[in-house]
């Protein structure tokens, strides 16, 4: 008890920690330097999440996460039930895969992937009587688990970062012992112009999110959690604030709406006022960042002891008749999703997995929804023709890309070096490795130079040289 001169009548309120004072101040004014403000197209934000029916066949790539591909544990002709492990993790930086439906393993072999090369996959023919019920579960008492056991349980779920990076969640929460973590930052920004899956998860699965935050805090030893949400989502801010547990160790912070607010380093700066060093991770300043969708799913899956079989995906764009956020089983063919959402003549339209700023355009409908797919955007022919007819001009050295780059890089110089194929200089002198390909530079370039594409190609060359 804090008293003055021993007189209990003069009790003093405990002073908030410096970190709490940072969060409170930046919660009203939180932002970061530079960035852009793309036009918002979040028309699906007001529609509740719906379920997508099972496709007749599911194709599950063994490599749908960063790290080593999973290893099949089933054989062709074997019957499986929904939730059953069908591929095991291959080492630490890997996660298992679970059957999304009741069915029979029809094939194990190479199938098309969103990245281009065909990849080893498991194909399951769905039983017509398959239901949404998960038939494989091992419930656990989370309160009795040690931090190490929680991390193992997270790996057993097959969970990866659902924000798009697809980094195994247990690995992200396994922080070095020499870097103690004081705060878990929960990323609810969802700054991509079209995506609303995280927004709907916060509104509809807030209780699961709070449970997932608790489990993650115990796993990393954090004493505090801060949920960062862009201030264009006031309903999500209020909904989660109403669900905050007593004690004050979990806060909701409304940060400024700006792209790319959802990037880790930007959110840590905006929500806590802490600078992550160049080339470093948030753990360097005692922070771990996790996506709201990831933690909400963990809050539901871990106590029930079931694996990840589905995820919420935003399906939208000018070429979609029934846009919305859908629970989509992992492994659902893209054509099935588009047919269900009302996309006609999709072969004549451009399809992007993820958001328009950082997403990936695909050329085939034979690929399937994987754990890292947060959105499916369909643009009609008029959009494609307008984009295709844009002419690229030489750099006019206007400096707009420098003003926009949230990492403070020089995209103009990097672009010129890429044009001359001076890739080593891009990495050693102009810090190409700090670029996380947010697309701000390409967005503002008046010469329509595809800077991000150039940077991706340069990184690929540098990786090949290093291997």
Image (spheres, rainbow, N blue to C red):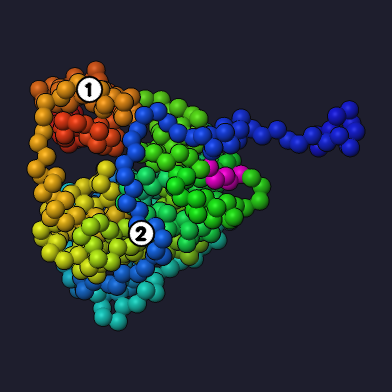
Question: In 3D space, how far apart are the residues under numbered discs 1 and 2 (Cα atoms)?
Answer: 36 Å
Residue that extends furthest to the top in the rendered view of this protein: 429
- Please identify the quadrant where the N terminus is shown: top right
Q: Main secondary structure of the magenta part?
A: strand
Q: Nearer the viewer, residue 127 or 447?
A: 447
Total numbered labels placed on residues in the image: 2
Q: Which residue is mark 2?
A: 44
Q: Give percent across and percent down for residue 88.
A: 31, 57
Q: Is residue 412 above or below residue 281?
A: above
Residue 207 in picture, x, y percent from top left: 53, 59
**Residue at 35% from the left image edge and 64% from the top image edge:** 327
Q: Is residue 102 above or below residue 160?
A: below
Q: Is residue 111 left or right of residue 126?
A: left
Q: Residue beneath label 1, please?
A: 398
- For image coordinates 50% across by 50% down, the residue present is 234
Residue 31 seen in this snapshot: yes
Q: Residue at x 28, y 35 (%)?
A: 440
Depth order, front residue of 39/215: 39
Q: What range is drawn magenta here?
A: 249-253
Task: Using the rendered image of the protein, determine whether residue 76 is visible from the camera's viewpoint.
Answer: no
Q: 10 Å neighbourhood of mark 2: few (<14), some, or many (≥20)? A: many
Q: Is residue 252 magenta?
A: yes
Local SS, label 2 = helix
Nearer to the camera, 322 or 63 = 322
- SS state under label 1: loop
Badge 1 density bin: few <14, some 14–19, many ≥20, Cα 10 Å: few
Picture layout, residue 349 above or below residue 131: above
Q: Is residue 455 left or right of residue 9?
A: left
Residue 432 counted in the magenta span = no
**Residue 283, image x, y percentages:** 45, 33
**Earlier residue among tags 1 and 2:** 2
């Amino acid at each position: 008890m804090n008293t003055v001169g021993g007189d209990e009548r003069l009790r003093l309120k405990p002073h908030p920690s410096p970190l709490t004072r940072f969060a409170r101040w930046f919660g009203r004014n939180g932002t970061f330097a530079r960035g852009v403000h793309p036009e918002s197209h979040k028309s699906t934000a007001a529609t509740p999440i719906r379920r997508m029916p099972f496709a007749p066949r599911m194709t599950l790539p063994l490599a749908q996460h960063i790290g080593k591909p999973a290893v099949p544990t089933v054989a062709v002709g074997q019957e499986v039930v929904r939730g059953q492990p069908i591929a095991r993790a291959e080492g630490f930086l890997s996660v298992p895969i679970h059957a999304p439906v009741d069915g029979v393993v029809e094939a194990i072999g190479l199938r098309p992937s969103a990245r281009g090369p065909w990849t080893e996959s498991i194909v399951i023919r769905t039983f017509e009587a398959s239901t949404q019920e998960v038939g494989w579960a091992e419930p656990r008492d989370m309160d009795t688990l040690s931090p190490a056991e929680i991390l193992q349980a997270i790996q057993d779920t097959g969970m990866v970062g659902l924000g798009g990076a697809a980094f195994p969640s247990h690995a992200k929460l396994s922080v070095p012992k020499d870097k103690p973590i004081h705060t878990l930052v929960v990323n609810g920004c969802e700054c991509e112009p079209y995506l609303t899956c995280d927004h709907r998860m916060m509104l509809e699965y807030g209780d699961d999110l709070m449970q997932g935050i608790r489990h993650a805090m115990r796993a990393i030893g954090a004493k505090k959690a801060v949920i960062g949400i862009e201030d264009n989502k006031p309903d999500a801010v209020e909904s989660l604030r109403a669900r905050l547990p007593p004690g004050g160790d979990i806060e909701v912070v409304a940060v400024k709406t700006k792209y790319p607010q959802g990037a880790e380093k930007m959110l840590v700066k905006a929500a806590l006022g802490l600078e992550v060093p160049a080339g470093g991770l948030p753990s360097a300043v005692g922070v771990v960042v996790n996506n709201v969708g990831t933690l909400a799913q963990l809050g539901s899956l871990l106590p029930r002891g079931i694996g990840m079989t589905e995820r919420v995906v935003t399906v939208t764009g000018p070429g979609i008749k029934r846009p919305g956020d859908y629970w989509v089983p992992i492994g659902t063919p893209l054509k099935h999703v588009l047919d269900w959402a009302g996309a006609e003549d999709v072969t004549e339209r451009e399809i992007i997995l993820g958001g328009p700023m950082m997403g990936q355009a695909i050329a085939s409908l034979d690929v399937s929804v994987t754990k890292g797919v947060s959105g499916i955007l369909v643009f009609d022919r008029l959009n494609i023709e307008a984009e295709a007819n844009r002419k690229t001009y030489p750099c006019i050295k206007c400096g707009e890309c420098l003003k926009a780059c949230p990492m403070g890089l020089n995209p103009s110089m990097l672009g010129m070096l890429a044009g001359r194929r001076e890739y080593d200089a891009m990495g050693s002198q102009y810090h190409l490795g700090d670029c996380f390909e947010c697309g701000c530079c390409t967005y503002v370039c008046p010469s329509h130079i595809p800077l991000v594409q150039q940077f991706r190609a340069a990184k690929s060359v540098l990786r090949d040289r290093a291997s």
